Image: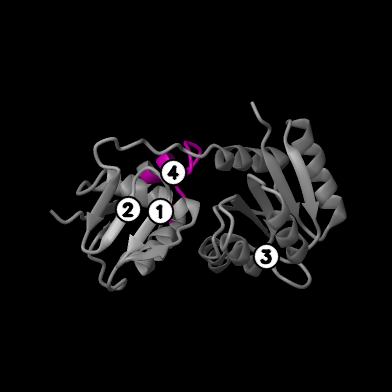
Amino acid sequence: MIASKILIVDDEPQLRRVIRAALTKQGYIVGEARSGETALDQLHKEEFHLVILDRNMPGMGGFEACRKIREFSDAGIIMLTVRKAEEDRIEALDAGADDYVTKPFSMPELLARIRANLRRVPQAKIADAAFIEFDGIRIDMNSPHVWVQGEDVRLTPKQYEVLHYLVSHSNVSIRHAQILHAVWGSEYGGEVEYLHVVINQLRKKIEPNPSLPRYILTEPWFGYRFNLPH
């Protein structure tokens, strides 16, 4: 099995050393960057499977770096933040992060999050429906490509995985926890805000009117349902 490559982006050398030692012990290949700018340079030069990205850094902050990484990379991103405010968590996810961990954190917690985010759930191949098309929207069910009115729309990995799961279970109401388990992993289930952010992002990208969704519908206090037109 090929070892996963992880890039640690943090301006604190001691924290980078601690995380690097723990990851190396687990068999990961580890790179380091002390700023968002340096991280972007490294990610343009070589491929990493996962980025551990600090929120607060001199120069380019974590949120801006996350948004720029998402312009060209599908690597998993875990944001490190010292704040527990819901606004910070939402902003991290909205910037394109897949997950976040609040400082101070335990190393077992971080390792568990890393394993979960590296364990991308392979999407089932839809042999008899390679593409789903409706109302000018075309979704590739076997690779992360979506077109809206002929325009290629870029989705983050989590956005595509959520969309794929909902479309694969079209016209069925699905619980929050079921979606979280399927997309993020069995360790997740109560992080409903993850779904709220991703669903809002998807609506902005594929719905004609995101504030009055036609396709990705909310089932109050339960979950979501993808309304696939017949």
Q: What amino acid is labelled 1 in the image?
A: His
| x then y, percent, for residue 142 | 38, 42
Which is nearer the N-term, disc 3 or disc 4?
Answer: 3
**Label at residue 139:** 2
Q: Is residue 131 magenta?
A: no
Label 2 CA crowd tier, 10 Å (few <14, some 14–19, many 20+): many
Looking at the image, residue 39 lies above or below residue 178: below
Which is nearer the N-term, disc 4 or disc 1?
Answer: 1
Which is nearer the N-term, disc 3 or disc 2?
Answer: 3
Q: What amino acid is labelled 3 in the image?
A: Gly
**Label at residue 183:** 4
Q: Nearer the viewer, mark 3 or mark 2?
A: 2
The colour mode here is one colour
Looking at the figure, which quarter contains the N terminus?
top right
Q: Mark 3 and mark 1 in contact (Cβ < 8 Å)?
A: no
Tell me the element at label 2.
strand
Q: Which residues are magenta?
A: 179-192
Which is nearer the N-term, disc 4 or disc 2?
Answer: 2
Tell me the element at label 3.
helix
Q: Mark 1 and mark 2 in contact (Cβ < 8 Å)?
A: yes
